[in-house]
Image (cartoon, rainbow, N blue to C red):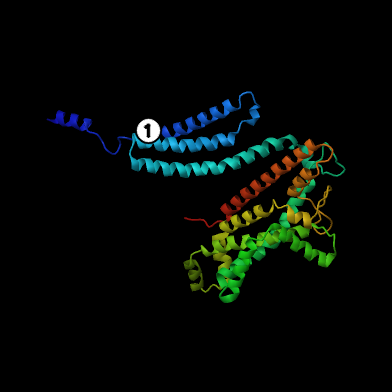
Amino acid sequence: MTATTAAAASARVNPLTTGQLPAWSPWAILLGSWVLVGGVFALMNTGGDPADFNIAATLFLGTVLFVVLLTVFSSVAENRRRAVDRLVTSLVSSAFVIVLIPLVSLLYTVVVNGLDRFDAEFFSSSMRNIVGEGGGAVHAIWGTLLITLGAAVISVPIGLMTAIYLVEYGRGKLAKAITFLVDVMTGIPSIVAGLFAAAVFVIFFGPGTYMGIAGSVALSVLMIPVVVRSSEEMLRLVPNELREASYALGVPKWLTIMKVVMPTSIAGITTGVTLAISRVIGETAPLVLTAGITASLNTNLFSGPMTTLPVLVFSQYRSPGIDPTEALDRAWAGALTLILIVMALNLVARLVAKIFAPKLGR
């Protein structure tokens, strides 16, 4: 009797595990879809240049084919409910992959083309008296760092104090007016910020004035609303219980903000400031109007024009000189350098946020 029961139990079908695709099947279908679409593109490119093979289109169409095939196989081997679940899951995952395709393609293109001039001369020389081969971007690198630093020095205190006012003190019509103006400034075109800064400096210094600090002022107009918005959201996330506990101990409000609210939200604020810097470090139009273009190294923000990496890339494409190939190589190398600077800033921001974030536990 016991042997018969055991045999029946072993032969019994489990409705929760039957009719399911193997765990490895989605990955196999995805890989097969990419290979299939890649084979079709390879056949279409037979006899052509291998460099013309479109990797981005292969990944995109292969991912779309994967969603269709996975849904069909699931509906046949499983049930309708499981098929719908796999369809939605694959759509979400595929959306992530498709979003990454332009980013990966862009990074690949910039790295491949930028490495040709990513040498010691590029980081040690300027474009002074260079009309063809050679030259570098040391003047543009210094200009980018100094102008962006000037913009951060202007924007971060103003934006942070504005956010503190809106969260901790702001009430009534004035706070609403400030919030409205910040929202308006968030969508302001960069060229308008450049025209504003240029007009201000023309009033005080006359027409034809190009200075690095003017570029910093133009970039600060774009940075301030981003700093205000990000800092405001981070400050609002601080629990009111922390403030009330500090007030209960007799700590004044300003000291509560400095010792309780700010340290608690410093990680998010640092991230917001980094995003604001990354937002403006690649601007070109406002800097052409305010900081100008120069081929020489200038480290004085308050005297003479300065060139940044985006402006250098723009000028190399616009005026390639007698050797367009060399100019394009310098432009790609400048774009790669700018990407590396932004990556370094993000790494520093994460490190600062990790060090100064509130420590949980004992």
The quadrant where residue 224 appears: bottom right
Secondary structure type for disc 1? loop
Residue 342 vs residue 320, the one in the foreground: 320
Q: How crowded is mark 1: few (under 14 residues within 10 Å), some or many (20 or more)?
A: few
Is 19 situated above or below 43? below
Is 324 situated above or below 214? above
Residue type at mark 1? Pro
Q: In this view, does 30 lie to the left or right of 269?
A: left
- Quarter occupied by the N terminus: top left
Is 284 situated above or below 3? below
Give the residue at mark 1. Answer: 22
Q: Residue furthest front?
A: 44
- How many marks on residues? 1
The residue at the point 84 percent across, 60 percent down is 209
Q: Which residue lies furthest to the bottom in this view?
A: 172
Is residue 24 visible in the rendered image? The answer is: no
Q: Where is residue 195 in the image (x, y as percent from the top left)?
A: 75, 61
Q: Position of residue 258 (x, y in %)?
A: 59, 66
Q: In this view, does 2 lie to the left or right of 186?
A: left
The residue at the point 80 percent across, 64 percent down is 201
Q: Which residue lies furthest to the top in this view?
A: 47
Residue 200 vs residue 255, the one in the foreground: 200
Is residue 316 visible in the rendered image? The answer is: yes
Q: Where is residue 200 in the image (x, y as percent from the top left)?
A: 78, 65
The residue at the point 52 percent across, 31 percent down is 37
Q: In this view, does 252 lie to the left or right of 145?
A: left
Q: Where is residue 179 in the image (x, y as percent from the top left)?
A: 59, 68
Q: Which residue lies furthest to the right in this view?
A: 129
